[in-house]
Image (tube, rainbow, N blue to C red):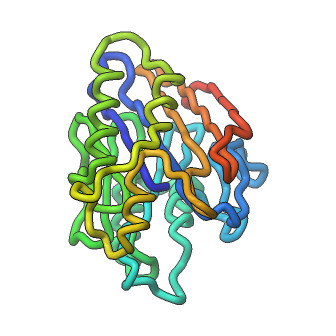
Amino acid sequence: MCLLLFSFNKHPDYPVILAANRDEFFERPTEAASFWNDDPSILAGKDLRQGGTWMGIDKNGRIAAVTNYREPSESKPEAISRGALVSEYLRSNESAEDYIQKVMAQRHTYDEFNLLVGDEQSLLFFCSVEEDYQTLMPGLYGISNGKLDSAWPKVEKGKTALKNLTQASEKPEAEKLFDLLADRTIVADSELPATGVSIEWERRLSSLFVHSEGYGTRSSTVLLIDRRGEVFFSERSFDKDAQVIDTSSYEFIID
């Protein structure tokens, strides 16, 4: 997951409005979002190489999402897959606070990451390069591969677009949120962040929707939770040519 934009308790009817892109190498085998056969309470995609996931929700309304924190020189050869951070939370009965404190104690077994866990009433955020987690206040947030709300052009542009789509009282339109995530505009070199990769890669990764040889946006996800506990979850998957290959949508009421 490389871009996570979300509104938390800002909309009068929707405490959670979330739009996210997962960027990954196309060679990495992936299963599209569905309720898992081995744990039918979990709705998420699945990384078939390591078994974890980048984002998901369970029938109790527990949400989790992870993004890599871009530190190319800090990669650990024996690191546990960061996708396990999401799947283990969704499989557990632990509170968000207990879980994130456990993760903090074990963070050095993973490459650097950003982790979001909680539900429509409380969301917690932890960046592994920080000393502590945050309990998020009502607001509009953006996470890419830096810290929360880093002033990266794609994060700021995405947050502005999300604000424009959600400031009215009407129900957010999933298609407009997908359109937001589909923006392929490359940022000017003078505005690019310096994150330890080459300038060519900084350019490729600067757009909200990433499209390059062998690597790019594999899926876009929209998640809406209203104040009655009704959940709408929709995932759109893409091939190496950035063409839509599947769209799946689910609706349920939180148990």
Residue 87 visible in the shown view: no
Residue 72 in picture, x, y percent from top left: 40, 79
- Quarter that holds the C terminus: top right
Question: In terms of image quadrants, where is residue 126?
Answer: bottom left
Residue 177 in picture, x, y percent from top left: 46, 28
Which residue sits at x=55%, y=64%? 83
User: In the depicted view, which residue is nearer to us: 23 or 107?
Assistant: 23
User: In the depicted view, which residue is nearer to us: 131 or 74?
Assistant: 74
Farthest-out residue, bottom: 77
Question: In terms of image quadrants, where is residue 68?
Answer: bottom left
Residue 189 visible in the shown view: yes
Which residue sits at x=34%, y=71%? 104
Residue 225 in picture, x, y percent from top left: 46, 27
Specify whether 26 is left or right of 73.
right
Number of dots carrying numbers: 0
Specify whether 151 is left or right of 37.
left
User: In the depicted view, which residue is nearer to us: 176 or 214?
Assistant: 214
Residue 108 in picture, x, y percent from top left: 39, 82
